[in-house]
Amino acid sequence: MAFEGLADRLQNTIQKIRGKGKIGEADVKEMMRDVRLALLEADVNFKVVKEFVKKVSERAVGQEVMKSLTPGQQVIKVVKEELTELMGGEQSKIAVANRPPTVIMMVGLQGAGKTTTTGKLANLLRKKYNRNPMLVAADIYRPAAIKQLETLGKQLSMPVFSLGDQVSPVEIAKQAIAKAKEDHNDYVLIDTAGRLHVDEALMDELTQIKELTKPDEIFLVVDAMTGQDAVNVASSFNDLLGLTGVVLTKLDGDTRGGAALSIRSVTNTPIKFVGLGEKLDALEAFHPERMASRILGMGDVLTLIEKAQANVDEEKAKELEKKMRSASFTLDDFLEQLGQVRNMGPLDDLLKMMPGAGKIKGLDKMKIDEKQITHVEAIIQSMTKAEKEHPETINASRRKRIAKGSGRTVPEVNRLLKQFDEMKKMMKQMTGMQQKGKKKGGFKLPFKPF
């Protein structure tokens, strides 16, 4: 996560003030000095830091804090609200044209991941918004750019419009929109050319495409790992094209995250999406409030719920709940659950979305080894159907056979069977307590079991 260093610093600073019954100007001043340093170290633009510190300081020593019952918590609320505001306040939604297709111009420098992001955005539009997009190969200069987009189109089973590399990008864009109208594609994503730096020839071409296609959105794809340079690139493109949004890529990398906090303030252009990995579904809508929560260690439950809803089959979840109640949950069911959780993304990222995760010692440095899950899957897949349904029948010789078949050791098989047995007992207890709670109005599970 790009904000880890900043998050650690801010959470430590906030911890000092959280429980204070009284807060004076000296406390606020000390806290803001730490906040200022944390932001500057995270590569946030100096002017942005200055303005942010000024706003928080004014509110933190004002009436709303001094008269509250818990001044420490009130200061944290102020920091969260101002951090949210800094990143754009509310989520900025993608445009929808009154008369389809909605045209999106994807622009940016070479190496920012523009072509891949074009594919990811098309995938998101289809999966989340039920749209029917067309990809347009208008980068005729970079070797293999057209081929790359066509490969992405095949992977996604999505149409890619191309006229090769001998036709002008302006003409390609014009014919693509006509074809999209004919084929009833409701979104057209134009992958334009990039350069190693902003130059006149590039901007002339992009301006011509903009004048001809009259796009509903012009998205700048920018690499979060370039730090302050990302802000300068965003400013240049915005001055010349009038951007409607920014897509930040590589926000999952080992970066300081300052670009995300600076771009909105410096360019007044909203961050619309963020790339959080290599896979074609690793693009998310950017929610300033949720990101502020994550940075301040308050978790991000809404994103966690959305991930679960997108990856967990509701009918299967209901069926599974019945099995848990009747204690007929099998190793096959467990295997299916592992698959659904894996689809939600890296497990250490999911854990960090839990409220209070920032307070768990060592969680920031913890890397959950995905190989362990692969090993568990291999062990279960080496069992017969009868063994998966009745693991209590798995004797010593069967354990040896399973270990050999999965390429694991007998102690690993033993450990899995023991853990599964304990999990079943716990499920029985919890669902039993929930049933009692329904009768007596007592204990209820705070969540539906997966």
Image (cartoon, grey):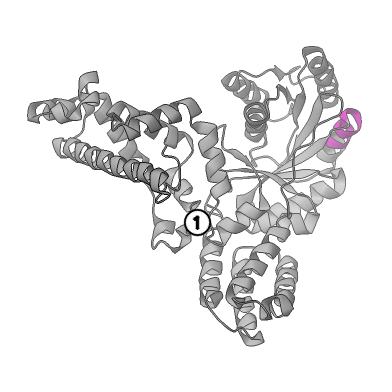
From what the image shows, is residue 163 above or below residue 70? above
Residue situated in front as seen by the camera: 180 or 444: 444
Q: Residues within 10 Å of mark 1 (few under 14, many from 20)?
A: some
In the displayed structure, does residue 396 sit left or right of residue 117? Answer: left
Q: Secondary structure at mark 1?
A: loop
Mostly what secondary structure, the magenta segment? helix
Tell me, yes or no, if residue 412 can be seen here.
yes
Residue at (58% x, 46% y) in the render? 250
Q: The magenta stretch spans which residues?
A: 206-213
Query: Measured from the top left, where is residue 289 in percent x and y?
Result: 65, 54
Q: Is residue 212 magenta?
A: yes
Residue found at the very far front of the displayed protein: 440
Residue found at the very far left of the displayed protein: 397
From what the image shows, is residue 174 above or below residue 44? above
Residue situated in front as seen by the camera: 427 or 386: 427
Q: How many marks?
A: 1
Query: Measured from the top left, where is residue 67 in percent x and y?
Result: 68, 80
In the displayed structure, does residue 437 sit left or right of residue 200? Answer: left
Indicate the quadrant containing the C terminus: top left, top right, bottom left or bottom right: top left
Q: Which amino acid type is shown beneath numbered disc 1?
A: Pro
Query: Measured from the top left, where is residue 441 in percent x and y?
Result: 43, 49
Quarter of the rendering containing residue 323 = top left
In the displayed structure, does residue 79 sit left or right of residue 383? Answer: right
Residue found at the very far right of the displayed protein: 211
Quarter of the rendering containing residue 397 = top left
Quarter of the rendering containing residue 428 = top left
Query: Measured from the top left, where is residue 196 in percent x and y?
Result: 70, 43
Residue at (45% x, 40% y) in the render? 448
Tell me, yes or no, if residue 313 can be seen here.
no
Q: Is residue 260 magenta?
A: no
Q: Which residue is mark 1?
A: 355
Residue situated in front as seen by the camera: 22 or 277: 22
